[in-house]
Amino acid sequence: MSFFTRFEQRPLWLALMAVQGLWGGPACAAETDLQEKNPTIHALTPVEVRGASAREPIAPGSVGETTTHINAEGLRLLGGPAQSNPWNALRAAPSVNFQSADPYGLGRPASLRLRGKSSTHVGRTLNGLPIAGEPGFANGKGGADLIDLENLQGVTLIRGPVEANQGFGFSNSGVVNSELRWPERTFGVQASQSFGTYDFRRSFVRLDTGDLGDHAARGFLSFSDTQADQWRGPGDSRRTNVEAAFALDITPRVQARIYGVHHEVRWDSLRSLNYDQVRDESLYQDIVYNDHLTGSAKDDILYYKFNRQELTNKALIGDLRIALDDRNGIVFKPYYWQETGWVLSGSANELGKNKPGVNRWNIDHDNYGFDLHYESRPDWGEWQIGYWYQSSEAPPPPTNRTSYEIQPDGSLQFRQWSTLAKTTRHKYMNPYATATWRHGAVEISGGLRYMQYEDPSFQYFEADGVTPSNDMRSEGRTYRSWLPNAGIAWHLTPELLASAHYGRTYGRQNWGSVASTYTQNKGAFQAAGLDFNEIWNGLRPEQSDNYDLGLRYNFTSGYLASTLYYTRYKHKQLNMYDPDIGVSYHQSVARATAKGLELELGLSPVTNLDFYLSWSWNKASYDEDITTKAGTVVPVGGKQMQDSPRHMAKATAIWRPGAWTLMLAANHIGARFGDTEEQERVESHTVVDAGIYYDFSRFMGIRDASLGLTVSNVFDKRYIGVINSSDYAVGGGTSYYPGAPRTVVMSLSGRF
């Protein structure tokens, strides 16, 4: 039995033994004696990297890594009036194309593309942990917008290579990490109230206890409720959050914290457009879901109450830190997350070809795991060695879908199971190590993660939900890969920094609707000589090799940075339309290349005035034409990936004259294509947002009191925002969603 086999079979036992030994063993006893002699020694805390100034709302990494950090002020100014989705604040970063069909980001669809790749493979972590469904699960809420932005310290976007101790889960296209705001050490109450167009309303309140007793314990409790009407068609969206945390300094060397959240969200869907409709702006607000039943099933699949979602998320996040001395310590971060809910969608072919019906996707899944690592900071730098484990259940892929027939009176009658499967769990066993060496003007870093991922096994059932399908079953597989990273940063002069970074990353395979597609088209697949296992086993996780070269010049009033990047993808997955079969299905058959240039300028020409500008050129294309399993050639070689603009430019200005704060942001997204054969062109657009805030602190005992007015899409630009929700589709019909119109919000906030 190999070392790694023994290591991965006892993940929880290993974690508990390590913590128990460090807590109560001889080493801990010795350190207790030491702390009594020197009570000023405290547990190690994470080193947080910032830009030149902690006040900068937007700041780059400090040693040339391609990261963008948005601090708490940046989240307040750039995170949007709903203060619910950190992605919104990242729009100013280079190579980021964030689009939302909802002006407040309360519902779906929304998409984040980074260097041409979709959000499916952008890692989403909360305090470094993948608090979500199967990492990157597009339909689950998870770490994308689980926490109110007021309860975050900041958000960091990693655009390029990812270090071995970051981006746990699959993070083939960068990582968005949200940093929790733990309980404050002083008592306080924070509250805000907002109102806006489309009957938008949001209330938020947070109570911090401050230090209790002998400064050993503290906690907080917060509540928020947000709702708004849909701007296109009938229906609304609502989001309710309850969050709480507790921190305890057990000894000067041992600190424990736990964070919990209960998150509820529901929304009525927005109807998509096809390409012909996209070209007529007058249709944008006419193509909507129906607000009443007609008695005709083919029309009533468009009834808005048959196209909606409700989801409930619960999560617990732990953080235990044990300092062995001033330089060495142990960190143990366990977590648990659960999501339940359902998605309703009408379909013209739900019950067979040209047989309309409604599909209900039942979602009930969880994940749990931990990150356990030893960290050390010797004179020459720092190093870590650790282990990440996670077990999660489907979906994805979908395992519980039912089909309903619409009755003449508008009720729904169950007809069959469209998808039903028994499945085992996804499992991840990942030991890792990182090190950073500093000498003079040079910093060298490196790391290695051993990615071991167990794919679950599946047994599907026939439409009656009872009979196992003999030709629709698969055995779980295990994927293994070494994920190295390395980097060097060199201060050529005190002002000029050159850097080079490399990292290998992994993106999960997208099972999508493989099972339901095969079930509905079994005869066509079999006629082409394809069975279910052949299609299923042909899916593989994507893999990429990422290279970044950077140069940054720091001057008195700011900085200028440039990055050249190059990424090679293999086993890239596509949901391709196969005309020989007449359906689209997922296949891991492509290789692709992404390359580009990113420029950033941060400037503070005078006191209290900050500018941040970025420009990026991105080319993300397929290396060659693709041949489907049925032998059909799809001509995509050299074509730009869909929804991937070549050019993007962003500008943000923040001015603070006296008690006022003024913000102006412009976001230009170049022309894109909705298909990889470059037949469906979507024109470029520029959207301008603005905000103005007045600080009347110390008014009636209120501190940090602010009255604000924000205007999104100031010039009411009509444009296409979301194109699909991933970069898998090739051929077939692409769906589009108009961008949100002008919205105006007034807010009042303060601390007591």
Image: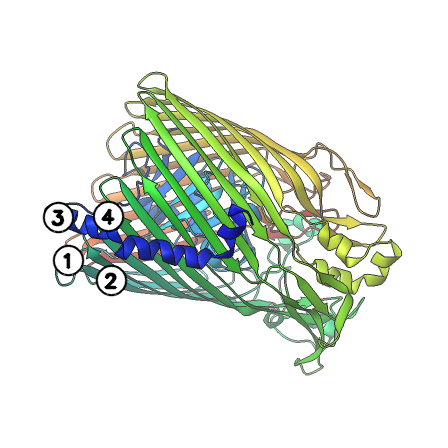
Can you name the residue that lies furthest to the left here? 37
At 21% from the left edge and 61% from the top edge, which residue is drawn?
218
Residue picked out by circle 1? 215
Q: Is residue 477 left or right of residue 113?
A: right
Q: What amino acid is labelled 2 in the image?
A: Gly
Q: Earlier in the sequence, mark 3 or mark 1?
A: 3
Q: Residues within 10 Å of mark 1 (few under 14, many from 20)?
A: few
Q: Which mark is residue 39?
A: 3
Residue picked out by circle 2? 219
Q: CA distance from mark 1 to mark 4?
A: 15 Å
Q: Is residue 147 visible?
A: no
Q: CA distance from mark 4 to mark 2?
A: 19 Å
Can you name the residue that lies furthest to the top here? 493
Q: Is residue 486 above or below residue 374?
A: above
Q: Is residue 612 above or below residue 703?
A: above
Q: What amino acid is labelled 4 in the image?
A: Ala
Q: Which mark is residue 43?
A: 4
Q: Residues within 10 Å of mark 2 (few under 14, many from 20)?
A: many
Q: What amino acid is labelled 3 in the image?
A: Pro
Q: Residues within 10 Å of mark 4 (few under 14, many from 20)?
A: many
Give the mark toward the camera: 4 or 2. Answer: 4
Give the mark toward the camera: 3 or 1. Answer: 3
Q: Earlier in the sequence, mark 4 or mark 2?
A: 4
